[in-house]
Amino acid sequence: MHFLKILQNEHIKIYKKTGTWIIIGILVTLLLGFAMLQKYVLDNGDQSNWRNQAEARIAQMEEGMERGPDIEAGREAMGKEIAIQQYRLDNDLPPVAADSLWGFMIDATNFTAIATLFTIVIAAGIVASEFSTGTIKLLLIRPVRRGKILLAKFITTMMFALFMLILLFGFSYIIGLAFFGSTGSQLPYLTYTGGEVVEKHMAGHIISLIGFRSIEIIMMATVAFMISTIFRSSSLAIGFSIFLMFTGPQIVQLLSQYDWVKFVLFANTNLMQYVDGTPVVEGMTMSFSIVVLLIYFFVFLVSSWVIFKQRDVAV
Amino acid sequence: MTQPIAQIINVKKSIGNTPIIHGITLDIYPGEVFGFLGPNGAGKTTMIRMLVGLMKMSEGEIYIQGHHIQRDFEKAIAHVGGIIENPEMYSYLTGLENLKHYARLTPKDIPKKRLEEIIKLVGLEKRIHEKVKGYSLGMRQRLGIAQALLHSPSLLILDEPTNGLDPAGIREIRQYIRRIAHEENLAVFVSSHLLSEMQLMCDRIGIIQHGRLIRVEKIQDLVSKDIDLTVELKASPIEKAFQLLNDRSWHPKKKGSWIELTVSEEEKIPELAELLISNQVKLYQIYSNVQTLEDTFLELTREES
Ligand SMILES: Nc1ncnc2c1ncn2[C@@H]1O[C@H](COP(=O)(O)OP(=O)(O)OP(=O)(O)O)[C@@H](O)[C@H]1O
Ligand SMILES: [Mg+2]
């Protein structure tokens, strides 16, 4: 199929650039650095007395329950916590240590922020660089509609995001294993659903953590892609997207007393808020956020497409 | 009557509120090299951008092989290969990788043989595996021509293809433009402000100024119309030759060992040779210098402004 060849072209153009491999190198280096820090520098405390800690935690929660938390959600969270800690004691399941394979991998999911940053850089360049180097002219005088070229570029950006996440997961596993060995890797992830504690595989939990964070990658990459397409400037797209990425969630928090804030993109990017936390604005639900995200996603894409299709190319 | 490959019908273009192209109508036929001649800022590149669908016309229509360039873009552009201004390529890819990149953008498969053939045609065999970063301007131009020819278009559009080339490079490009036009029955639309070059390369020339096509003519017509030919000849004995010519009112002038004179048309040249030879003058060399198009061009554009 011809579209696959167009996709292949876009992939070649990304992966033949030295910059892309520098980005990948940086991600791996940061993971390595973090593993060394965790292993040789940070003091992770003594894990042997985890029972005492669990008991203390239960006592603390029970006391809190008696005093009566202000909101229903808080009461629920405490109940869950007690159930899980109790389950640990009953089944002799210590929590994962920070300096173990799973502990390292869970912490490494925070590196999705860096993966987002790098994906923004790629998304910002994929259209704008064709304009800045002038290659757009020879690209657009082919028997391929502009929409197809743009779609291939967008899919390539998304594939890059996926590639970054797979790299993150893969390398955090390899590095985690190399630095911390496999002790404790049989430990399950405990979650409280349907009134009881359930054991789940830890790898699945880590993937779901990354999965939730990937919403942010997709949305930020789409923002960068749109700005890059509309303004044909990769530096503007990078600057603006990174600025939004860092300030957006905070501004949303600041303004959370207003009801309309729930329609702001950044009030919805973190779906984890519905799993273990409280929504930014009361009354928001996971499905509401998914709908809002989808609307933003399509608006961004359609505006990129309309502009790209209409544009007079005069570079 | 052959069908035109490209039809440009009353095309106008304004950017913002500034009109840049004021209604150009033009047909381009297979096998011809059409020169699009105009001073800087005349609107050549703008017209070419519309011709390849990079810009939309404000008014008017463009058809390539009968397909509208905007409404039927894919079909129309499939017949076109081109370079617009500089042939910018992906500098971090090799020449071959660049060509393969463009080959993938054509729905029909381009066989490896065709690639090799084109690379050979533009003389890049030795350097094709090097990154374009290291190419000289001339090599980039050749690679540009290669990507334009890859899919065997029927209309080749070249915006100042000799820009930045050395005389040898210019001559080479000129030669293969002529060759491919006539061998492959391809129409070539080539823009330039270098007149001397157009004269040697084109069959027909359109002169554009301030966004208007002020004249379209066959090159012979444009060149020879009301224009004297300067003839230089070397003959022996020179005195005798001079005397003969002078007696018959050819108004010869002596220039060292050469005789120079002007004639009103080409037909006079064999007549002149005949005269000398039949009078036992040895004729060694004879040259005729057409008045350059440059003079004609300057004249035309001056009239208009
Ligand atoms: N994107 C644009 N915005 C505004 N004006 C433009 C734009 N592109 C071209 N022009 C104007 O249109 C006119 C024609 O420009 P064009 O590049 O087509 O000329 P040209 O004949 O190719 O010149 P040259 O021989 O220098 O390449 C110029 O006056 C130029 O300033
Ligand atoms: Mg130009």
Image: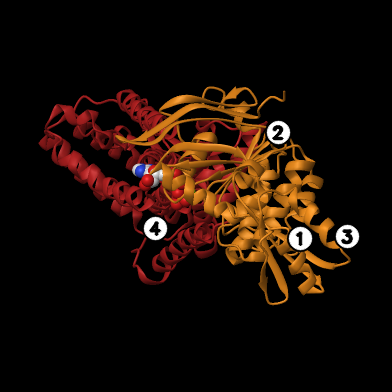
Q: Quadrant of residue B188?
A: top right
Calculate the distance from the C-alpha at mark 3 to the C-alpha at mark 1. Answer: 54 Å
The residues bearing labels 2 and 3 have C-alpha atoms spaced at a distance of 45 Å
Looking at the rendered structure, which numbered label has been put on residue B30?
A: 2
Q: Amino acid type of disc 4?
A: Ala
Tell me the chain of label 4.
A
Tell me the amino acid under the disc marked 3: Ser
Please give the residue where the numbered disc 1 appears in the rendered image: B125
Which is closer to the viewer, label 3 or label 1?
A: 3
Report how far apart the C-alphas of labels 4 and 1 lie in the structure: 58 Å
Dot 4: within a 10 Å radius of its alpha carbon, few (fewer than 14), some, or many (20 or more) residues?
A: many
Q: Do callouts 4 and 1 mark residues in contact (Cβ within 8 Å)?
A: no
Q: Which badge, 3 or 1, is on the more N-terminal residue? A: 1
In the figure, A70 relative to A38: above or below? Answer: above
Q: Are marks 3 and 1 in contact (CB under 8 Å)?
A: no
User: Chain for mark 3?
Assistant: B
Q: Are labels 4 and 3 assigned to the same chain?
A: no
Chain that is red in the image: A
Q: Secondary structure at mark 4?
A: loop
Q: CA distance from mark 4 to mark 3?
A: 110 Å
Residue B278, numbered label:
3
Between circles 4 and 3, the one closer to the viewer is 3
Is mark 1 in CB contact (under 8 Å) with mark 2?
Answer: no
Q: Earlier in the sequence, mark 1 or mark 2?
A: 2
- Same-chain check, marks 1 and 2: yes
- Label 1 marks a residue whose chain is B
